[in-house]
Amino acid sequence: MKDKKDKREAMKLSELSSHQEAELLTTSLEEWQDGPQVLTYGAILICRKGRAVVNVNYKDWELYKGAVITVFPNDVVELRKAMEVENEERRAMEVKNEERRVKNPSALLPESSYEKQRGEQADSSLFVLSSSLKSSSLFQVEMLKYNPSLLREASLQLEQTVYSSLREDRCRQDSPVVTNIINNMFALLKVYFDQSECTCISQLVLCQLKAFFIGFHEYLQRNPQSRPDDVKSYRVRKLFNHFMMLVERDYRLSRDVNYYARLMNITPKYLTLIVRQVTDHTPKAIIDQYVVLQIKMQLQHTTQSIKEIAWEYHFSDTSFFCRYYKKHTGMTPRQVRE
């Protein structure tokens, strides 16, 4: 029962309430550690402490202090690995304690005195080490979460190429320019968020989002990312991103690879080649995982009946819907709601 309660609380943390347009917070992204999930919000994140590997739409991005990444509603995200930053002071203290133990002249002390001193040193060492462990920095990001409605409104005034390029090249790890932009943006927004009587937060966040999207897009155009994995051609990456956007749009309508290949004017075989090249998965596996994640979210967060959800996702009947969900999760839809 406690585990279920903790899960429900974690899920609440991962969403914005219906009346809340935006939120500025510091988090360790614990809610992203329970396997892949579909975001119900958009966010701009800057890493403040530690290191982690974040997977967004089947692509890994390494985050460390100062790194900035953008995620959008309906992105599939997972925190693959969060690492503790080693504390220099702690390591120095460990070395010092070890040297002290090695140099301890036990033979020159009476046994009782030695044991007493050894015990005091051990207690002292434990105290120092435990204090260092408590103060050592874990992975942490500062995040601006915003409601999809804000993204829709911002997108109306932005070229589609801006949105598409941000989805393709969404992270910068070693860019003082981008880090400074986000630091200044978050500092300004924090002033407004701290004023409980402020009634125009959503409009202020909207203005900042548009400014960031336009500025970040322009910066990306001037400073294209060069990585070893860029051996993948521009066309391959563009087609894969197009495939993901179509899945996000039409996942309720179709789970058929042929359907998406037809929309992209390519063969199913070529679509499979592209998706495997980028993700090592088949298109069918990605479609099914995305559909299952969306169904799970609806089962957990809506009062729709199982029959209504099955109908919405164009399953021929409830029985087939339940078999499909159990095949991919090991659980029935009813068990998810228990």
Image (cartoon, rainbow, N blue to C red):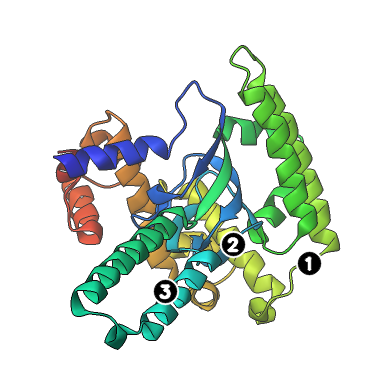
Mark 1 neighbour class, 10 Å CA radius: few under 14, some 14 to 19, many 20 or more:
few
Looking at numbered disc 2 in the image, what kind of residue is underneath it?
Tyr
Query: Residue pushed farthest bottom?
Result: 107
User: Which residue is tagged 2?
Assistant: 64
Which residue is farthest right?
Answer: 222
Residue at position x 46%, y 54% from top? 135
Q: Is residue 255 visible?
A: no
Q: Report which quarter residue 193 is drawn in.
A: top right
Label at residue 236:
none
Residue 61: x and y, percent? 57, 65
Residue named by callout 1: 224
Q: Read off the residue under disc 3.
A: 97
Q: Nearer the viewer, residue 289 or 11?
A: 11
First in sequence, mark 2 or 3: give its number: 2
Closest to the camera, between mark 2 and mark 1, is 2
Q: First in sequence: mark 2 or mark 1? A: 2
Say whether marks 2 and 3 touch (CB < 8 Å). no
Instruction: Report the quarter where the C terminus lies.
Output: top left
- In the rendered image, residue 296, in percent from the top left (x then y), is placed at 30, 45
Relative side of 155 to 300, left or right: right
